[in-house]
Amino acid sequence: MTLDALDALDALFAPRGIAVVGASTDPAKLGAALARSVAGFPGHVGLVNARRPDPSAGVYASVAEAAEHGPVDLALVCVPAAGCADAVAEAAKAGARAAVIYGGGFAEAGEEGERYQRELADVAERTGIRLLGPNTSGFLAPTRGLTASFVPGAADVPAGRIAVVAASGGVNHALAFLLSEAGHGVSLAVGLGNCADVTTADVLDHLADDPHTTAVALHIESVADGRRLTDAVARLTATRPVVALVVGRHDVGAFAASHTGALATSWRTTRAALAQSGAVLVDDERELVDAVAALSLVRLPAAADPGVGVVTAQAGPGLLLLDDLRGRRAAVPELTADTRRALAEVLPPLTYQANPVDTGRPGPGFAAVLDTVAADPAVDLITGYALHEPAAFDLVGAVDAARHSVPLLLGVGGAGDDVRRVRRALLERGVPVAGDPHGLAAMTGALLADARARSRTTAVLAAPARVDIGPGPWDEDQAKTLLDALGVTTMPRRACADRAEAHRALAELPGPVAVKLLDAAVLHKTEIGGVRLGVRTPEELDAALDAIEAAGARLTRRQPHIQRSLVEAMAPAGVDLVVGARRDPVFGPVVLVGLGGTTAEALADVSIRLAPLSVSEAAAMPAELAGRALLDGWRGGPELDRTALGKVTAALGDLLAARPELAEIEINPLRITAQGLVALDAVCRAREGGA
């Protein structure tokens, strides 16, 4: 992004003066609502109404006339869609460098609306003015005294240290209100709308230098330029944490033909790309508020696996908290013998003191418990929960008395004004606070995820192997020849043009063998009956070839005829993975690792990364799988060599990144055996229309 573009976003979010284009005296109209919203802005405000100008009342016939009475950096445009492009062009000519387009009727409304939006984008490109929207409810910048929103109550959101960047204007305001209710304000809260010009990445780049912002809440519905977004997130997370909520968990849109395409939906890929760039992921708006609120106050040092000390004043909520933390892969280490001896001097007997630490009930020794747990060498963070019991002890006083050698997060249960005062007092002391165990776990998980993300080092990528991929299309034998060149192990095989060649292959290969239909157009051979396993005798081979020929005939709707076949030695038993690389339409090359075989899509247990990537990054992907226990010698089975898997995965990603003519390459299954990884099936597809 150019310096001029950054300056223009300053004009958008920190203007010296504003013009409301389409200002109205009718209180029900949008122009009247915006005029009311900006009435308290400390800079110049000019209301523009060409039909009813009244300069004595600050209502002008044009933006140019309003600019004669003070600077106009920002135009708030409240006119119908058909007139917006002309209104923006007029504002740009008068010196405005930014505009917000509030109304609807643009790309979301069909063909005519798409034309209006193109006209807006053309004006922005021609004049250099930056546009927020259209189809947005605007933004809040309380630190600037600016409410550029027509939503009732928006002006009541206090200034704070959290920025909200949301695809939806409604979600933007909902998050701002939730943060306000939780005791936090916002530095900036932006609803992007249709993104005719200003995008999520633009706003994130702007926030990277914002001294008022310490954490960012990000809401994503769709992404136009994936790498532009992830680059912006990576730059921002170097100095400020980002917490992301991605919409579309149940998206089942157009898939690619392979398992990799079906598994790498836009929702999964977007989440994976954001996490790889350093963002913390959450599943709903409540967790988003808890997570970003905690990270706005506390950021742990970078660490691969920070240890959490859990202190609870009530056992039941403590168990809920511990269970939730375990689900977030939190390390809750057992405390040392010295720590437990010190706790025994403070706590009553029969309480659990190994971690979690159960105090029985809160009491005067709570501060000493916090200090003792914090001193344990395995503890990097304390997460504590207590019901509000003012007669038993003073929680705020205990926090004041504690030495805070490690960061502290607290959950305070209860209701009423007194509880709210306690929570507010803790926030004033820089202690993130939640109202329930789940919220506290979300806060803790966010700090851990952020610390882990920053602990990952960016390895220098090795130069990809130069491999001759041939012209394509590629059948299974050709795809496996490509894998052989990449160093991926395959089983001995023969591509056979007729039955005589198939019988020679059966005689020469170690048995038993698999017999497969060999056709580059057939990606899922098992589903059409194109695979026969465990073939040992010539008679079984003839029966297998008969079945394959019939399957091919059903596919082509022709009479059974000689089909090319692949005769391949059977692999040892093991655990099956799917490993693939595909060219995502938004993010470009991505790789995927998951539990494989014919149930891959049903299980959808996958890990995704942007490619190219290092072997070490690829080797870490299985740790994210829900079924990862199957990979570590489950019930005497083979154990995964993660480095070997990392090499396979990185090689596929490198190949796709280096060869733009490829759409995807997949190994399914890639079997974990006692002898190592073996590719049992492979698919390679070219991009439609070439590179």
Image (cartoon, rainbow, N blue to C red):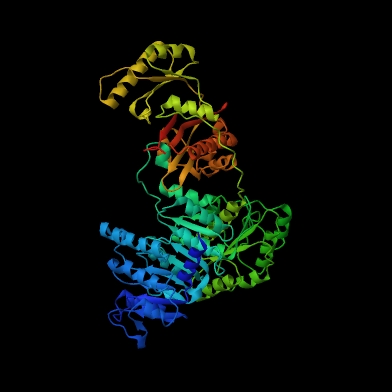
Q: Residue 196 at what x, y percent from top left?
A: 38, 60
- Image side of residue 378 versus residue 316, left or right: right
Residue 258 shows in the view:
yes
- Image side of residue 53 versus residue 599, left or right: left
Q: Residue 41 at what x, y percent from top left?
A: 45, 79
Number of labels in the image equals 0
- Tell me: residue 392, above or below residue 610: below
Please state, as top left, top right, bottom left or bottom right, where the C terminus lies in the image: top left
- Tell me: residue 39, above or below residue 579: below
- Residue 130 occupies which quadrant of the picture? bottom left
Residue at 50% x, 45% y: name it: 610
- Residue 71 occupies which quadrant of the picture? bottom left
- Tell me: residue 254, above or below residue 685: below
Residue at 48% x, 25% y: name it: 481
- Residue 382 occupies which quadrant of the picture? bottom right
- Image side of residue 123 versus residue 560, left or right: right
Q: Residue 395 at what x, y percent from top left?
A: 61, 70
Q: Residue 342 at what x, y percent from top left?
A: 73, 59
Residue 393 shows in the view:
no
Residue at 28% x, 66% y: name it: 82
